[in-house]
Image (cartoon, grey):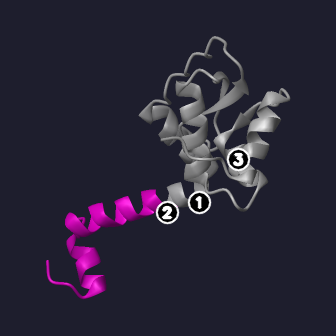
Amino acid sequence: MAYPLSPALTAARERLQRGERLSARDVWAADPCIHRSAAHLTLTRWHAQHLTHIVEWRRYASNGMPAPVYAWGEGKDAPRPKPISKVESIRRWRAAHPDLFAAQLNRMKARRLAARPPRLDPLMSALLGVRA
């Protein structure tokens, strides 16, 4: 059963038919009445019905999955990009958050020292008041 489109989704369809290229994020960000899942579901249905095609893939987060950008009309879909490898994802995160990465290294060092404390020589244990 086909449901009637809301006025906001009708406006998004008109924008697509005028030649704009839109992703689901563009659709739901344009109008506060549209929920993001409704925008995604509607664009996905139009694509399944061959009313739209994917012209590009846009990555909004540095490590996130790419999102399809749609254009109205039939056409050949752009190939989906390969996912980012785990190594590349970690490298990007470390470059973007050097302070958090340094804190992570410090916690690792503290855990390692707590698990295996260094042996104290007799002079150092006498200074610290610890029996060897």
**Disc 2 target residue:** 103
- Quadrant location of the C terminus in the rendered image: bottom left
Q: Residue furthest left?
A: 132
The amino acid type, in three-letter code, at marker 2 is Ala
Vertical position of residue 83 compared to residue 113: above or below: above
What residue do we see at 72% from left, 25% from top? 71
Q: Which mark is residue 57?
A: none
Q: Residue furthest right?
A: 18
Q: CA distance from mark 1 to mark 3?
A: 43 Å
Mark 1 or 3, closer to the camera: 3
What residue do we see at 43% from left, 35% from top? 86
Over which residues does the magenta segment extend?
A: 103-132
Q: Earlier in the sequence, mark 2 or mark 3?
A: 3
Q: Is residue 118 magenta?
A: yes
**Disc 3 target residue:** 9
Q: CA distance from mark 2 to mark 1?
A: 6 Å
The amino acid type, in three-letter code, at marker 1 is Asp
**Disc 1 target residue:** 99
Q: CA distance from mark 2 to mark 3?
A: 46 Å
Q: Earlier in the sequence, mark 1 or mark 3?
A: 3
Mark 2, other Cα within 10 Å: few <14 / some 14–19 / many ≥20: few
Q: Secondary structure at mark 3?
A: helix
Q: Position of residue 68 (x, y in %)?
A: 62, 31
Whether the residues at callouts 2 and 1 have beta carbons within 8 Å, the answer is yes
Q: Is residue 14 left or right of residue 99?
A: right
